[in-house]
Amino acid sequence: MSARAADGTPRRLVVVRHAKSAWPGDTPDHERPLAPRGLRDAPAAGRALAEAGRLPDLALCSTAVRARRTWELACAQWDAPPPVRYEPRLYAADVPELLEVVGETPAEVGTLLLVGHNPGLQELVLELAGGEEGDALERVRVKFPTSAIAVLDWYGPAWRDLAPGGARLTAVTVPRGSR
């Protein structure tokens, strides 16, 4: 793990919305699996992160089946996946809850990946990027679709210091797998 803030480089929060899920009849929301498109898109998300050099030191993942499966398929694309913590509070979390969970991240983690759900993730990206303007932020305002990846850079001594308006949105992508 790398101590990013100590050497002047930014910390990085990588926000990933779970891949496209299915809606089987009587399946509870928390247990919904990935749809065929999600099974193609989740590995594409992993490849996109690797190609961009945005692999995390630690991942926090919702306990929902669709989020866990997205994580498993994405990180299977990497030579050495980082540790993951499955966090029940990420399921249906709002911005304050998401910031609370992120704030518990050890200071030595330089890049943190968060796998979860909308609307919380979209709202988190918008809150953290604050008054920033630009094409990437406008894309997030309009829609943060399944498999979307937002990358936010920020400076601070500890993850608990990450606050609304305190980060810069540096990339937004929506990887899609081949059909």
Image (tube, rainbow, N blue to C red):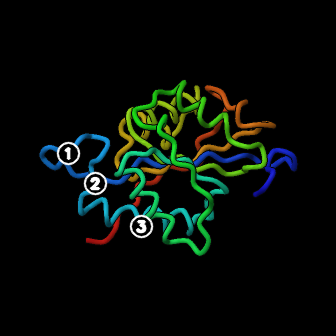
Whether 15 is drawn above or below 72: the answer is above
Residue on which the image places disc 3: 43
Locate the N terminus and report the quarter of the image it occupies.
bottom right
Label 1 vs 2, first from the N-terminus: 1
Secondary structure beneath dot 1 equals loop
Q: Give me the C-alpha separation between circle 1 and circle 2.
A: 9 Å
- Asked whether, in this view, residue 166 is left or right of residue 63, the answer is right
Question: In which image quadrant can residue 30 be found?
Answer: top left
Of labels 1 and 3, the one closer to you: 1
Secondary structure beneath dot 2 equals loop
Query: What residue is rendered at 42% in x and 65% in y?
Result: 73
Q: Amino acid at mark 2?
A: Pro
Q: Give x and y (percent) for residue 85.
A: 57, 49
Query: What residue is rendered at 81% in x and 44% in y?
Result: 5
Q: Which of the two residues, 135 or 47, is positioned nearer the viewer here? A: 47
Q: Give x and y (percent) for residue 79.
A: 59, 75
Query: What residue is rendered at 58% in x and 64% in y?
Result: 52
| Image disc number at residue 129 | none
Contact, mark 3 vs mark 2 (Cβ under 8 Å): no
| Image disc number at residue 33 | 2
Q: Give x and y (percent) for residue 69.
A: 39, 58
Label 3 vs 2, first from the N-terminus: 2
Q: Amino acid at mark 1?
A: Thr
Secondary structure beneath dot 3 equals helix
Residue on which the image places disc 1: 27
Q: Give me the C-alpha separation between circle 1 and circle 3.
A: 24 Å
